[in-house]
Image: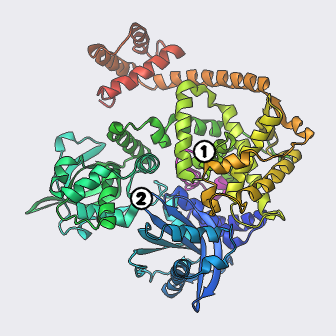
Amino acid sequence: MDAQEFKKDFLESIKSAAAVIGEGSCAAFADNMSQYLIDAEVLSDFVPSFYTGRKLSRKYRVDGYVLDEFDSTMNLVIADFDGNDMERTITNAHAKQLFGQLVHFINVALKTDLYREIEISTPCADLIDLLRLNETKIRKYRLLIFTDADMSSAIKTIEIPDFENVPVEGQIWDIDRLFRVCCSEQGRQIIEIDFREYCSDGIPCLEASTAATNQYRSYLGVIPGTVLADIYDRYGSKLLEGNVRSFLSTKVAVNKKIRATILNSPQMFFAFNNGISATALDVQVENTSKGRFITFARDFQIINGGQTTASISNARYKDKAALEGIYVQMKLTAIDESTQEESDELIRNISRSSNSQNKVSDADFFASHPFHRRMEQISRLTFAPAAAGVQYETKWFYERARGQYLQEQMRLTPAKKKQFELQNPKNKVIKKTDLAKVQNSWMGHPHIVSRGAQTNFSAFAEWIDEAWNTNEAQFNERYFQSTAALLLMFQFLEQKIPKQTWYEGGYRANVIYYTAALFRRLIKQQFSSADLDLMLIWNKQELPEIIQQVLLDISEVVFFKITDPQRKVINVTQWCKRSECWDGVKILTYELPPEIQNCLISSGEVKSAERSAKKDQKITNDINAQVEVIKYSADVWKRISEFAVVNHLVSPADVSALAIACKIPEKLPNSYQSKRLLALLNKVREEGFNLEQ
């Protein structure tokens, strides 16, 4: 797949989405673009809020927004969508006009009585409320143009004046740029830093040459506080490695002790602070008469020291602190990028180890959790039943890594690509965040899901990590199929809600989360020993008509409840994030029709099916363990045995298993022995055993 194919497919998907959902093509375009950019970590979330008008003799417009609460950046989106097949170009003049409409919207939202003119309980009213409430907290406005035109090559830099002393950044996202970012090997936006832009020579450093391996090199440097703050002000939360950003945003406030040192004892900062740890690809170091300096780093990510970085920047911004005397020690690990998957895994492992002092659990590194590999494995092997009238079976494609679905098509011939898409249709792609949304909603946490993809993902990770450690066999083929069934429910509501006569626009996502949660709660209340038969939906690959009708009835009740004028918080979007909102929805009354019983399954049948699925998963685990063990030769197991014995890491059962492993392939360990051998392998690695020797 090349850029032209991607653009053609993307625009076709916009047309079909608009037709199915019944909303304008421009809204579908903005929504689809935003979902790609959320996956690429350009945006943390997206709330549609189209509004346009004229005030103070000028036009204003906005199509959506998200406030990144971690770095206090307000992202505002304007869509430039034509939808015609004719090629067109967005010029510098047109881009300035569009950015001007967004800036004018900010101005009229904050400086005029526009909030009185817009009907309350609408997304734009929520946006204005959010802008006014956070006016003094917003540190940057990031304005984004989503366009289906090609960006003119004449556009090099985008300069937008500050708004009321708050920096304003402009970004143009055409489909070609979307393709380059989302279809890159990283599947996300890559930060490239030329340190000489911030200090003339770069960052002074020493190379820890004795610690270098074929996987990485390490440097110890001293980075001025002003430089660290400048970089953070420019790149914001994108500077922090994904797991660290998630961990800090949900669990740790800016450190008061760090702030106190900056304000009261800046000369002691270097001595008192642990510094930062970072990773990067393609690190460039120059030798000069003054010493060695790091001049450039690509994919620069802070994996430890996010608090330090944010605190220094906040102290300069909020407290007007002078940072000239602040210096921060930095350990920079330059990763060899021979294979992308190995590089990503190494970065995650370094991040996990670097953050061990912060009591970070495996849940905080959920992106690398074995749960994902299992879901991916099941998705590649499991065929969904053919839908009514269709003569072939399909698969639900689980994206363990960003952009996997697109990247798997990159080198396919047109015929193979068509075959791939027939077997793995776009509407059956399961993203990690989608799985977390549907499962957390179904478990009764719609208020947490409403807090955004990142926050919900972190909450779901905590539950999965605990449940996995209790009994990982429960996450099996049946669990995957149930997830797909829930996604069918969500997709149905996404398509049908906009077409309902009662729907006044806005909050569709929140309505869906609360509808799913309330539906299950009502089943539990009115049929205490039963639950929805999700396998029925899986086998049909569609919702029975009675479920469709019930869901639409409940969604209507939910919509009017969350937008009730008597709610405690005026901003509906913010109100949906509160547990009190869920408390109010919980007590809504709706009598489920008797026919719904045909779609239910008794708790006894559920337990029996789950026991069977767990048993099957354990058999699969046993086979996988044996396959993994025999990947290593007898010589490798002999080395492991010697290392483990010398370091007192083995039990009698381990000795028996090792004796057999040392005779591979003449003898093969059984499943129990294989699991012990893999556990021992992890243990010796932690103790410093080098598997590559």
Residue 246: % across, % down: 46, 49
- Residue under label 1, please give it: 436
Q: Which mark is residue 238?
A: 2
| Residues packed near mark 1 inside 10 Å, few (<14), some (14 to 19) or many (20 plus) | many
Q: Is residue 591 magenta?
A: no
Q: Nearer the viewer, residue 341 or 667?
A: 341
Q: What residue type is disc 1 on?
A: Ala
Q: What residue type is disc 2 on?
A: Lys
Q: Is residue 415 magenta?
A: yes
| Relative height, residue 420 to residue 20 (above, below) | above
- Looking at the rendered image, the quarter that the C terminus falls into is top left
Q: Are marks 1 and 2 in contact (CB under 8 Å)?
A: no
Q: Is residue 155 left or right of residue 210?
A: right
Return the disc, 1 or 2, that comes first in the chain's sequence.
2
Report which quarter residue 594 is drawn in: top right
Residue 640: % across, % down: 34, 20
Residue found at the far bottom of this picture: 57
The span shown in magenta is: 399-418
Residue found at the far left of this picture: 289
Cα separation, mark 1 vs mark 2, equals 22 Å
| Relative height, residue 617 to residue 146 (above, below) | above
- Say what secondary structure mark 1 lies in: helix
| Relative height, residue 566 to residue 243 (above, below) | below
